[in-house]
Amino acid sequence: MTATQSIQSSPLMVPLLINGKEETPASTFDIISPYTNSPCWAAASASPADAIRAVDVAEAAFVTWSQTKPTTRRDILLKTADILESRLEENAATMRTEMGAGVADSQEFMIPLSIRMLRDIAGRITSICGSSPALEADGQSAIVYKEPMGVILGIVPWNAPFVFGIRSAACALAAGNTTVLKSSELSPRCYWALGRAFQDAGLPSGCLNVLSCPAQDAPAVVRAMIEHPAVRKINFTGSSRVGRIVASTCGKNLKPCLMELGGKNSAIVCEDADLKTAISAVLAGAFMNSGQICMSTDRIILHSRIAPAFIEGIKDALKPSDDHSALPPTLVNAASRARVEAILQNALASGAHLIHGSINETGKTSPVTSIRMPALILGGVKEDMAIWQEENFSPVASCMIVENDEEAIRIANTGGYGLSAAVFTEDLRKGLAIARKIQSG
């Protein structure tokens, strides 16, 4: 199914899911597809009152759901995985329409990964158990129980909706909690589809509720839920800027929060690395999902002895194909492209140069004016440049050449904490030693 077919066959409105029912309030907002830079459908806009109501029903559902047997929860999650698998092509088309993922990224990687994650989570439910610790004095005993917390709020992003939706919702449900997902305003239909799959698998009403709202309404909607007494924990994935706001609100309300934020992710290519392996892995890490992954490789740190060969290998690997109809990677929206273009222009004006790609191609579009940016690799980058310090979230990576492993480690550890890192060397002992010194993960 193509993105266009998905648009034609999908309902015009993405509803809220509250207490097992689909709701469409009077207020809605348009979802812009990056393939067309035009609306593909509209989504229901939740108000703070809707958010409070969703938490209320989740609190009510917790009373029963928290007492269900582990095998019951396991079977519902496994059935949900089967349903998601049966809807793989449809959901992948929705994901491509909303956030621009390619077929390989959506249908062959991300959604299958989310299904495997769900089955793995389901398989671990029956192993959740407490302990009986040894005590200091004779004649005493103690038992440690692991109990569900209550209502868990999941604030989830647009770039891998099925993966993050499963991680946030399924983990909470598996442990006997109930949950409310506040979806990204850029991919609400993906999260609605996930909620429908759980409901169709027999999840009781109120255990999983899915809300959407435009970006300008999100602060009030999220704050209402964090401040609700029934919300016991918050799971947030998104930018560091928004993460600070969420963490501050959680702190004021004395509530724990689990956060996955942005960062700069480095790949160190040592002088003894297998260049064929390193080039293949670095390109996959940099350009999968148009570089719109929080663990994307956007820093390539090269030992000077292999840098020329590595750069030539990158150029060869990225040579244009014979298919002249092929289009550059898609970005999620025009604002994202404008932000990256500004960072690129600043880097080039400050002395960086292009190893691969052309800045003039960033506006290349399809006949329907899709939002695209070609894969770009920069050289001559300095440590104080924004392109080296700030998360790109685009198909753009930068190279820096170093003289030794110590310099590579120092540079990898500057400019913020990374979510991932890689070391390429044929010496396993050295690779592990370098990895232990990198502040990432």
Image (cartoon, rainbow, N blue to C red):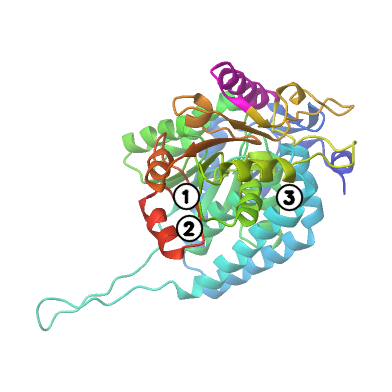
Q: Which residue lies furthest to the front in this view?
A: 305
Relative depth, front residue between 58 and 9: 9
Residue 342, how many percent across, how many down? 61, 19
Sequence-wise first label, 3 or 2: 3
Marker disc for residue 106: 3
Can the viewer see residue 86 in this picture? yes
Sequence-wise first label, 2 or 1: 1
Which residue is disc 2 drawn over?
177
The amino acid type found where label 3 is placed reads Ser
Residue 311, how many percent across, how many down? 63, 41
Sequence-wise first label, 3 or 1: 3
Q: What stretch is highlighted in magenta?
A: 334-353
Question: Which residue sits at x=83%, y=25%?
Answer: 369
The amino acid type found where label 1 is placed reads Ile
Q: Is residue 275 above or below residue 339?
A: below
Residue 257, how many percent across, how many down? 40, 45
